[in-house]
Image: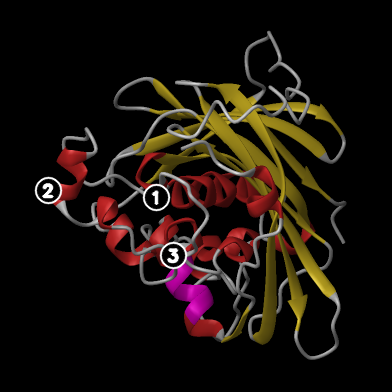
Amino acid sequence: MPIDPATLLAARIPERIQEYDWRDCALYALALGAGMNPVDEEELSYVDETRLKVQPTLVNVLADPGFWLRDLPLGLDWRRTVHGEQSIRLHRPLAPKGRVRGVTRIVDLADKGAGKGALLYVERELFDAADGALLATLQQTVFCRGDGGFGGRASARPAPPAMPAREPDAAVDCPTSPQAALVYRLSADLNPLHIDPAAARLAGFKRPILHGMASFGVAGLGLARLCCPGEPERVRAMSGRFRAPVYPGERLRVDVWREQPGLARFRAVVVERGEIAIDNGAFEFGESQ
């Protein structure tokens, strides 16, 4: 049965309020690979409570509404949904502890056609629960492979700009640990695809894969190191399109093109397989203080 656009656009996704502290920040950073070099002072700043720096992509897991695609009666074939794109925009730097409120809604959808799937465009706003200030705006595109053919528009958003044709200006290597998915799921996303070998094989993978959002965070850690070393509070925005899975323990090489002051384009490549994991990336950052 085709999905009903009116039902989706009117869906009430539960709000969530979450208190977090330095332990949540450190656990998230450990999942991304911070601290794998035990004498790297910049990496240690993400896990040491006495001088804690907050990795900006932490906003992706704060006040997360959970697996609402499965839990709400939306008529979607949730087993065939895939995370297609992600973007974050920070309106002010995250504090090492706080109380936040997440408000999530479906803002648009596109019909790729029967047998081709549909796209859901989802927005989550993260607020400081103490003063009501908007901390971050997150946008997500979900590819619903089994839900096309409902008669909607074929496209609801413009395509991202093409990547630069020249060689990258810089690159940064970002290792992941074999336990990365096991640690990341303690912050968000308990999908068995990331821990259960049988579930991974059923989905067509040889073993559990790393969360796409974890790969996004790994790339973000490397980009912050390259573009604003020691000052992650300068990060303003990050976006990218997911292209291929990453297996825990693999290494990402983040290729970077400096487009203009405060803006870099990037692509994350799995070194072991030469596959592009994240493409059409953009990373924005402010000036050094």
Q: Name the mark on residue 52.
A: none
Amino acid of disc 1: His
Disc on the earlier residue, 3 or 1 = 3
On the image, which quarter does residue 184 sit in?
bottom left
User: Residues under labels 2 and 1: Cα distance?
Assistant: 16 Å
Q: In the rendering, at what x and y percent does residue 253 appear?
A: 46, 32
Residue that badge 1 annotates: 211
Q: What kind of element bears circle 1?
A: loop
> Is 91 placed left or right of 191 in the picture?
right
Q: In the rendered image of this protein, does residue 208 appear above or below residue 12?
A: above
Secondary structure predominantly adopted by residues drawn in magenta? helix
Amino acid of disc 3: Asp
Q: What stretch is highlighted in magenta?
A: 24-29
Confirm whether residue 166 shows in the render: yes
> Is 221 placed left or right of 92 in the picture?
left
Amino acid of disc 2: Ala
Looking at the picture, tell me which residue is in the foreground, 107 or 187.
107
Q: Which residue is drawn at 60% across and 35% down?
A: 119
Nearest to the eye among marks 3 and 1: give it.
3
Residue that badge 3 annotates: 71
Q: What kind of element bears circle 3?
A: helix
Q: In the rendered image of this protein, does residue 186 appear above or below residue 251?
A: below
Q: In the rendering, at what x and y percent does residue 257 appear?
A: 70, 25
Residue that badge 2 annotates: 198
Residue 230 drawn in magenta:
no
Q: Which residue is drawn at 39% across and 50% down?
A: 211
